[in-house]
Amino acid sequence: MIAGFELVDYSRLGTSDLMKVALQGDVARRQLDGYLAGVLGRFGDLEGDDAMFAVCKQFGIKAHKANRQAKVASGLRALPDVLGAVKDGYISMDHAEMISASHARAPLAEGEHVELIMEAMRQDCDQFKKTLATREDQRASVDGLSRTERQRARRTASVFDGDDDMVILHAELDAIAGQRVKTAMAAMNTRLLYHDTKAGHERTYHQRNADALVALMTQQPAGQAGGKGMAANGLSLPPPADEPDPVGGADCGPAPQKTTLVVTAEWDPIYGVLQDAELIDGTPIEIEELRRLACDADIIPAIFGADGQPLYLGRTQRAPNQAQRMALFARDQGCVDCGLAAQACEVHHILPWEQGGPTNIDNLVLLCPKCHRRAHQDDHQHAYHKRRRHKPRPPATHHQPPDPARPPDTVPRS
């Protein structure tokens, strides 16, 4: 029995009882994780960190996991209150690990660890990661470096063998570089999906991601073995007619992948400056970093409501333009139903085009392919909320009749 939790026979339990037991088990797991970390930390005090790592390897886990467990246990020795919060079941070991890592990079001020424990109790790991990053920036600002510069100093990548001779890649990149990689992979994933549709192949989203990563990392100059635009499985990947050749000439090596980063910023009309810049996932970036990115960027002013590319096309065309897509990326930040990354989403008309719905920014939302199909099958609409998200709602009982003047369908349904 652990902290009052008894292992019961769950085979005959109903949904509510299963939920209750699962929550009790989660608290017990946290307490056991904290207790084990305390034991390992004490062992490290007596015998050293190398001996502690050797003990962790006896747990039947892989070396990199054993090293991580030993590292966390070692770091928490300096944060007894954080370790105590885990042992009491208030926060998870994942929260504690993030606090420990942040403390190692920029030591916590006296009493700050208690504030972070309270934040960890209220936030999930994704939210807490951003809170922790903001607090760490405040502590580390004395070194004169920006967050991006500190992140770049910690960048790392490794390749190692996994199970069944599979190869595992692990990388930690700064927010800007990471967003470039995600965008390039999403673009290549879309090209692979296009090819699969034409050729009748079937690959899962994650299989396409794996093939996209290999194609992006191992593409060769034209004229060399493998040819231009070849994926690892030998499938040809001809770029669209309006897309520049993704591979450089034989003398210059592979060309850099062109990526599109969506960055939003507030404009201060009083001082005439940009402020509060952030990436599409909400990660804040410094204004100096924004200026650096803008030097090499194609600026799309319509995202901010300028006259360059209209966000309100009405009934003039069904397919959204580039400015609208970028604005949707910045506004919705992903599938409005399930949260899948924006790069993998499609544009959906809330009031369907067939029923007179305009191609206006306030009648468009991002949906992943699965949620998009369900939206058309179930005829669900989406209501825009102030939290920059849409929530599904049942279809209206009466629909606007189709526009008899609308031209015949020549664009796939969105």
Image (cartoon, rainbow, N blue to C red):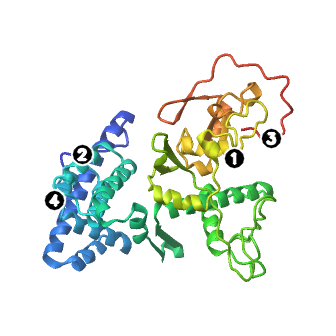
Could you tell which of marks 1 and 3 lies nearer the N-terminus? 1
Mark 4 neighbour class, 10 Å CA radius: few under 14, some 14 to 19, many 20 or more: few
In three-dimensional space, the C-alpha distance between marks 4 and 2, rounded to whole angstroms, equals 15 Å
Q: Report the residue marked by disc 1.
A: 322
The amino acid type found where label 4 is placed reads Pro
In three-dimensional space, the C-alpha distance between marks 4 and 1, rounded to whole angstroms, equals 52 Å
Q: Viewer-nearest of labels 1 and 2?
A: 1
Residue at 42% from the left image edge and 66% from the top image edge: 149
Secondary structure under the numbered disc 3 in the rendered image: loop
Secondary structure under the numbered disc 4 in the rendered image: helix
Q: Is residue 182 visible?
A: no
Could you tell which of marks 3 and 2 lies nearer the N-terminus? 2
Q: Report the residue marked by disc 3.
A: 411
Residue 12, percent across and down?
37, 39
- Marker disc for residue 80: 4
Residue at 38% from the left image edge and 47% from the top image edge: 127
Residue 184, percent across and down?
62, 61
Mark 3 neighbour class, 10 Å CA radius: few under 14, some 14 to 19, many 20 or more: few
Extreme-left residue of the structure: 46
In three-dimensional space, the C-alpha distance between marks 1 and 2, rounded to whole angstroms, equals 43 Å
Decide which of 318, 186 is in the foreground and name it: 318
Mark 2 neighbour class, 10 Å CA radius: few under 14, some 14 to 19, many 20 or more: few
In three-dimensional space, the C-alpha distance between marks 3 and 2, rounded to whole angstroms, equals 52 Å
Q: Marks 2 and 1: in contact by CB < 8 Å?
A: no
Secondary structure under the numbered disc 2 in the rendered image: helix
Residue at 28% from the left image edge and 72% from the top image edge: 56
The amino acid type found where label 2 is placed reads Met
- Marker disc for residue 118: 2
